Image: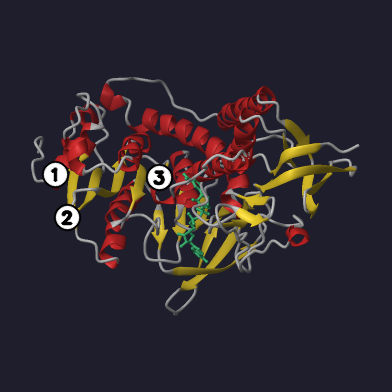
C-alpha cells in the first residue's frame, strides 16, 4: 500500500537533503530518495568534503616540508603515509554522511534507498538495489538529482588512470606525472593536492587563463603563485585524445587557434572540464518536463517544472555549487509550505580551496566594464597585513569594487590564505546593501586577516591607513 507524501525529493545531495530537512521542520510529510549507498551526494561523497580533507592534509605535509624549519620547528625525516591520509579523508566523509542520516531522522523524513523515476503526476517509482520496485504517491516532487562530470571525445574515463574527481580522490600512489585537463576549480584543487604530495603536475587549458569566471587580476596573480608552487600550465590547448599505453598515458593536444599538435606523457590524467545535469532515466517526459541542449532542466517561476514538480541545484540553471543547491532546496521547501522562499543568485559566493584560496562574490571588473558601470576600486595586499606577516602567508590581496555614484559594494575579490572564510562578511554586507564605507567604518579585530578587507574598503575613498 503506497503512502501519500506532501513532498518526495529525488536525490539526497546538499540540495535534496536540505530541502528534506526544511520540509520536515515545516511539518510536511517528506521522503528523500537516494540511489547511492550513502547520503550527501557528490559534495559529501566525491566532491567538496573529501577534496577538502586531502587539501588540508597535503597542506600540512607541504608546510612540514617547506615552512617548519623557518619557524624553528625541527622534525625528523618526513614521510608520506598516503594510506592513512586517505583513511582520515574517508573518516571525515563517513562521519558527515551519517550526520545527514541523523538530521533526516530527526526531522521525520523517510529515507528511501533506490533510484527514483517520475512515472506520472504525483507518482515516483523507486527501484531498489535488489531490483524490487515500489511507488510513492505525493503532492509535490522535487528533482535534486545533481550533476555528473563531462568528458571529451577521444577520452575514455576508467577511474584508475584516466579519472574524474571520483578517481582523483582515491589514487593508490602518488603519480610521477599528472596531467589535469581544465584549469577550473577541480583542476586547481586536485593539481595542488597531488603536486604537494610530489607529482609533477601539468594543467592543459583551452582558454588563455585559469579560473575563467574569476576576476582577471585575481586569476593572473593566482596563476603566478601556482606556477611558483610547481604547476605547469599549457594554455590555449585543445585536448584531442588520451592514448592508454601499457606503462604510460599519451595525451595529444593542439593549439585552440590552430597549429601543430603535440603530446605529453603522464601516469594519470584527471578530466575536469565541467559537469552536466544528471537527469538520466528520470522520467521528466512523464510530467511534460523539458531540458535544454546541455540537459539543464527548464524551470519557470521559482523552480517550477510542471504542476507539483520542482527542480533545484545542479539540475537547473545557475552555478553548480553545493551552497547554491542548499539555498534552492530551502527555498523550495518554503514555497511548498506556502512561505516566500527566495534565493539571491547575485550573491552566491565562489571559493577555490587552494593555498592561497580564491574567493569572490558579486561582479568582476570585466563584468562592470562590459555593463558600462562606473566603479571605484579599493585594494589592499596581505603583504601589508600584520597577521599575514606573522603567519608568513603574505601572498594575495583584497579588492573591493564600489559604485562610483552611490558607494554601494558591487563585487569583492580576494586571493589569500583563509579568504574562503573572509568572504562571508562581504556576503552579509552586500545582502544588506552595504556601501564600502560601512565596512571601512566597522571595527575589525587587530591583528586579523579581516583587517585587509577593511583597509581595502578604506581604499575606495582613498584613506587606506596601513600602507
Ligand atoms: P570548471 O567549469 O570549474 O572548469 C572547467 C575548465 O575546463 C574551464 O577552465 C574550461 O575552460 C576548461 N575546458 C573545457 N573544455 C576544455 C578542453 N576541451 N580542453 C581543455 N580545457 C577545457 O569545471 P570543473 O573544474 O570540472 O568543476 C565542475 C563543477 O564543480 C564546477 O561547476 C565547479 O564550480 C564545481 N566545483 C566547485 C568547487 C568549489 O566550489 N570549491 C570544487 C570543485 C568543483
Calculate the distance from the C-alpha at mark 3 to the C-alpha at mark 1.
22 Å
Calculate the distance from the C-alpha at mark 1 to the C-alpha at mark 2.
13 Å
The secondary structure type at the circle numbered 2 is loop
- Residue 17: % across, % down: 63, 36
Q: Which residue is mark 2?
A: 404
> Mark 3, residues whose alpha carbon is within 10 Å: few (<14), some, or many (≥20)?
many
**Mark 3 vs ligand 1: CB under 8 Å?**
no
The secondary structure type at the circle numbered 1 is helix
Residue drawn where x is 8% and y is 41% of the image: 463
Instruction: Identify the mark nearer the N-term, 2 or 3.
Output: 3
**The N terminus lies in which quarter of the figure?**
top right
Residue drawn where x is 45% and y is 68% of the image: 237
Residue nearer the viewer, 197 or 415? 415
> Mark 1, residues whose alpha carbon is within 10 Å: few (<14), some, or many (≥20)?
many
Residue 458 lies left or right of residue 178; in this view the side is left
- Residue 378: % across, % down: 17, 47
Residue nearer the viewer, 98 or 54? 98
Q: Which residue is mark 1?
A: 459
Q: Which residue is mark 3?
A: 349
Nearer to us: label 2 or label 3: 2
In the rendered view, tell whether residue 157 sits above or below residue 63: below
Amino acid at each position: 500500500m503506497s503512502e501519500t507524501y506532501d513532498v518526495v525529493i529525488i536525490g539526497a545531495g546538499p540540495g535534496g537533503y536540505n530541502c528534506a530537512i526544511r520540509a520536515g521542520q515545516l511539518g510536511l510529510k517528506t521522503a528523500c530518495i537516494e540511489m547511492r549507498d550513502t547520503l550527501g551526494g557528490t559534495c559529501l561523497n566525491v566532491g567538496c568534503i573529501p577534496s577538502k580533507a586531502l587539501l588540508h592534509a597535503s597542506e600540512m605535509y607541504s608546510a612540514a616540508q617547506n615552512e617548519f624549519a623557518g619557524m624553528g620547528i625541527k622534525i625528523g625525516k618526513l614521510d608520506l603515509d598516503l594510506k592513512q591520509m586517505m583513511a582520515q579523508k574517508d573518516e571525515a566523509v563517513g562521519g558527515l554522511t551519517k550526520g545527514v542520516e541523523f538530521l533526516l531522522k530527526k526531522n521525520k523524513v523517510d529515507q528511501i534507498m533506490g533510484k527514483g523515476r517520475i512515472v506520472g503526476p504525483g507518482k515516483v517509482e523507486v527501484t531498489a538495489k535488489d531490483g524490487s520496485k515500489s511507488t510513492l504517491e505525493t503532492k509535490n516532487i522535487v528533482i535534486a538529482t545533481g550533476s555528473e562530470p563531462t568528458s571529451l571525445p577521444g577520452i575514455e574515463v576508467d577511474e584508475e588512470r584516466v579519472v574524474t574527481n571520483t578517481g582523483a580522490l582515491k589514487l593508490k600512489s602518488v603519480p610521477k606525472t599528472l596531467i589535469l585537463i581544465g584549469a577550473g576549480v577541480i583542476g586547481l584543487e586536485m593539481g595542488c593536492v597531488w603536486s604537494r604530495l610530489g607529482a609533477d603536475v601539468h594543467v592543459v587549458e583551452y582558454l588563455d587563463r585559469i579560473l575563467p569566471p574569476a576576476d582577471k587580476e585575481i586569476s593572473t596573480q593566482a596563476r603566478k603563485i601556482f606556477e611558483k608552487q610547481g604547476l605547469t600550465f599549457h594554455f590555449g590547448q585543445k585536448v584531442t585524445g588520451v592514448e592508454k599505453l601499457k606503462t604510460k598515458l599519451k595525451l595529444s593536444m593542439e593549439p585552440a587557434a590552430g597549429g601543430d599538435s603535440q603530446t605529453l606523457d603522464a601516469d594519470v590524467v584527471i578530466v575536469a572540464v565541467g559537469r552536466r545535469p544528471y537527469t538520466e532515466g528520470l522520467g521528466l517526459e512523464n510530467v511534460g518536463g523539458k531540458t535544454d541542449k546541455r540537459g539543464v532542466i527548464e524551470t519557470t517561476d521559482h523552480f517550477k517544472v510542471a504542476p507539483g514538480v520542482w527542480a533545484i541545484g545542479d539540475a537547473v540553471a545557475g552555478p553548480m555549487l553545493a551552497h547554491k543547491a542548499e539555498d534552492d532546496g530551502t527555498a523550495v521547501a518554503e514555497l511548498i509550505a506556502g512561505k516566500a522562499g527566495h534565493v539571491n543568485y547575485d550573491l552566491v559566493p565562489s571559493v577555490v580551496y587552494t593555498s592561497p584560496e580564491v574567493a569572490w562574490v558579486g561582479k568582476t571588473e570585466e563584468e562592470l566594464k562590459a555593463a558600462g558601470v562606473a566603479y571605484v576600486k579599493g585594494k589592499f595586499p596581505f603583504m601589508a597585513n600584520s597577521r599575514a606577516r606573522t603567519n608568513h602567508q603574505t601572498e594575495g590581496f583584497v579588492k573591493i569594487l564600489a559604485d562610483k555614484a552611490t558607494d554601494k559594494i558591487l563585487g569583492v575579490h580576494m586571493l589569500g590564505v583563509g579568504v574562503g572564510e573572509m568572504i562571508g562578511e562581504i556576503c552579509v554586507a552586500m545582502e544588506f546593501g552595504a556601501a564600502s564605507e560601512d565596512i571601512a567604518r566597522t571595527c575589525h579585530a587587530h591583528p586579523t586577516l579581516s583587517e585587509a578587507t577593511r583597509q581595502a574598503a578604506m581604499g575606495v575613498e582613498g584613506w587606506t591607513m596601513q600602507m
